Image (cartoon, rainbow, N blue to C red):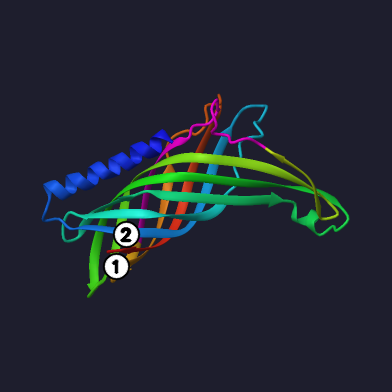
Amino acid sequence: MKIIRISISVLLVLFFAFTVQAQDKKVEFGIMAGYGHTMPRLKDSRIEKSPMINEYNLNGFHAGPIVVFNVGEQASIQTGILYNYFRGIQNDRAALKNVFGVWEQSKTIYSAIDLPLRLMYSVTLADEFSFFMFAGPNLNYSINKVTSTEYYVSNKLNKEDSQSNIYKAPSDYRAMDLQMGAGLGVQCYGVLLRAGYDWGILNRTKLDDATLRANDIKVSLGYTF
């Protein structure tokens, strides 16, 4: 949780720096939330694979406060703190049709914090309506990722095995990630709709002969004031 406290401190420093040193620059506050899709990308050349590495795509949502520093008529800098929640279920669809059969499925729950820093460029299309593009880094900190396996007999849950949080120390996985992202959107009377893609840069695993990176897609609805 230390990184979360550091992230909040950075946001406060940025806010006061821009407010004190640039009184003529408008600062906007807001909130943003929406759909999220995370895509782990695994390259593992080892003979024995780790069962704890989950490379399945997960769906979920994100939400949190944002701050926009308008540094010019068309340019601005956006940051904030976003909470992410993802989950996913993997199973054998053919086995699901067998009412009296025995089958299993895995369920993954994952949560993380984002600290994005985006440079935005806007083009006014009409009164209070604009199109914008954005790009910049995103600092991602994983809080929790747990995969459980459920065993069913005749479509009734018989047993459930749950792994521990893969980021709990000591761990073979790195909670911190640096991503580079870009996207576009529109804004009308303070309401914004945007879509972006973040590319994972850092290797998320400490295992030898294995690399794990995560790319994310986000579609967000927000409001600034």
- Please give the label number shown on residue 190: 1
> Is residue 154 or residue 197 the one in the foreground?
154
Report x, y in % for residue 11. 29, 44
Residue type at numbered disc 1: Gly
Report x, y in % for residue 175. 48, 35
The total number of labels drawn is 2
Please report the residue visible at 41 percent of the width from the left and 50 percent of the height from the top.
82
Residue density around tag 2, few if under 14, some if 14–19, many if 20 or more, within 10 Å: some
How far is disc 2 from disc 1 in space, using C-alphas? 9 Å
Residue type at numbered disc 2: Gly
Q: Nearer the viewer, mark 2 or mark 1?
A: 2
Q: Which image quarter: residue 46? A: top right
In the rendered image, the vertical position of residue 128 relative to residue 18, given as above or below: below
> Is residue 143 or residue 208 the one in the foreground?
143
- Please give the label number shown on residue 215: none
> What residue would you read off at disc 2?
30
Residue density around tag 1, few if under 14, some if 14–19, many if 20 or more, within 10 Å: some
Name the side, left or right, on which 206 lies relative to 153.
left
Q: Which residues fall within the magenta stretch? A: 163-184
Assign the N terminus to one quadrant of the image: top left
Name the side, left or right, on which 158 lies relative to 203.
right
> Is residue 36 or residue 29 the one in the foreground?
29
Please report the residue visible at 49 percent of the width from the left and 32 percent of the height from the top.
174
Q: Are marks 2 and 1 in contact (CB under 8 Å)?
A: yes
Name the side, left or right, on which 69 lies relative to 52.
left
Please report the residue visible at 72 percent of the width from the left and 51 percent of the height from the top.
91
Please report the residue visible at 24 percent of the width from the left and 41 percent of the height from the top.
13
| SS at mark 1 in the image | loop
| SS at mark 2 in the image | strand
Question: Which comes before the other along the chain, label 2 or label 1?
Answer: 2
Report x, y in % for residue 144. 54, 40
Asked if residue 180 is among those painted magenta in the image, a careful observer would answer yes
